[in-house]
Image (spheres, rainbow, N blue to C red):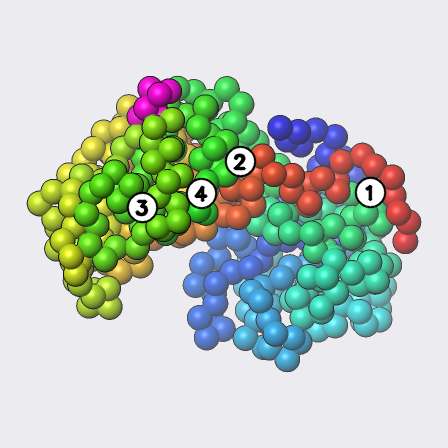
Amino acid sequence: MAGLKGIKTIRDFQLQDKVVFLRLDLNVPLDHGQITDETRITASLPTIQYALEKGAKLVMASHLGRPKGPGDKKYSLEPVADRLTELLKKEVILVEEPRSEAVKALLMGLKKTQVILLENLRYDSGETENSEEFAHVLASYSNVYINDAFGASHRAHASIDALPRMMKDKGIGFLIEKEISMLDKLLENPRSPYLAIMGGAKVSDKIQVIEKLMDLVDGFVIGGAMAYTFLKAKGIPVGKSLVETDKLNYTREMIARLEARHKTLLLPVDHVVTQDIASGKGEVTSGVGIEEGWMGVDIGPQTLKQYSAAIAGAATVFWNGPMGIFETPAYAKGSFGVAQALAESKCVKIVGGGDSAAAAEASGYADKMTHISTGGGAALEYLQGDRLPGLEVLRPQKISGI
């Protein structure tokens, strides 16, 4: 892996009186305009505060959700601007139109008590189209480009790819630096025993990362709906549980390859099942099989005991994907139990963003993890060996010019 080879960090630049374009990942969940999880905001604060301490003029930018256009106010960054105003104790000026002259006008008289936040970049179609023309506008008022949006770095969008191609001074912030250094712990000489806990809905979502980790880990622990594809592949009845029938052959082959390599593979031995997910009620099976008309929605108590014991004996654990539908209390014991086992373990424990990060947060044990990634998709793509556009563009190369 190239890791961060050749990539500068924000520490490498003279920032006094420079306009720093800071691409952040402020893509926080909102409920009727209220932020329900501000993890990504707080994770961005060290880089923001460093730039301000060094005397930079800040133009912060992010996307939020998938808006249909500038009129889609449900995805406005206004709640984020309000929260940043509170956290930074500075006035965060939300600029509705990044293409307007307003940004340059504001920068001319920007006070030390003020910072600029551009409205949702995806309001402009040029962002997702990786438009050089849109990037040119952003570059026209920027001296230094810093990417600290790990969760968006796997997408070749204008603020991630086209813009830094036009900038001479460019690098990463503290969040990306931490993300990559932590993920590298899973790839470069990880301490053994090394377990990968895989959950979530689909085997297909995890195939590439499973292949990458196959020769690195000492074993896999499988939960979530993807476990039913494994069990079905072994000829075990799974009722009406979610199964990827087109992945049964792959799953059988994977099981055989793990056995040939003498790797551990832990699958559920009991389950929490229901006939109707919406009922919010579940029953525990007496064994590994699931009867017709029932579906698995979480790992059972005996499975949790086995998984917790495996975690207790591990030196390195990567957790990606919940054990069940943890958003429903009756189906959350497996995911929260895994989080507790990790919290009580002295191992290096890295959580791969997305739903597993949400499960760790909801469990109350998030602060006990070594690292929780802010980028689910980006973390998986990095671990499976893909090149992230947001990193590759920052390595030494020719500048296309503004």
Instruction: Name the residue rendered at 54%, 36% in the picture.
Output: 384
Among numbered discs 2 and 3, the one appearing first in the sequence: 3
**What is the three-letter code of the residue carrying label 3?**
Thr
Q: Secondary structure at mark 1?
A: strand
Residue 175, percent across and down? 59, 42
**What is the three-letter code of the residue carrying label 1?**
Asp
**What is the three-letter code of the residue carrying label 4?**
Lys
| Pair 4/3: label in front | 3
Residue 177, percent across and down? 62, 37
Dot 4 crowding, Cα within 10 Å, few <14, some 14–19, many 20+: some
- The answer to whether residue 261 is magenta is yes
Instruction: Name the residue rendered at 19%, 47% in the picture.
Output: 237
Q: CA distance from mark 2 to mark 3?
A: 23 Å
Among numbered discs 4 and 1, the one appearing first in the sequence: 1
Q: Which residue occupies the foreground of this view, 376 or 56?
A: 376
| Pair 1/3: label in front | 3
**What is the three-letter code of the residue carrying label 2?**
Leu
Magenta stretch in the rendered image: 258-264
Residue contact at pointers 4 and 1, CB within 8 angstroms: no
Which residue bears the numbered disc 3?
Answer: 229
Among numbered discs 4 and 3, the one appearing first in the sequence: 4
Q: Which residue occupies the foreground of this view, 289 or 245?
A: 245
Q: Secondary structure at mark 3?
A: helix
Which residue bears the numbered disc 1?
Answer: 169
User: Residue furthest toward the right?
Assistant: 401
Residue 5, percent across and down? 70, 29
Q: Is residue 311 left or right of residue 24?
A: left
Which residue bears the numbered disc 4?
Answer: 206
Among numbered discs 2 and 1, the one appearing first in the sequence: 1
| Pair 2/1: label in front | 2
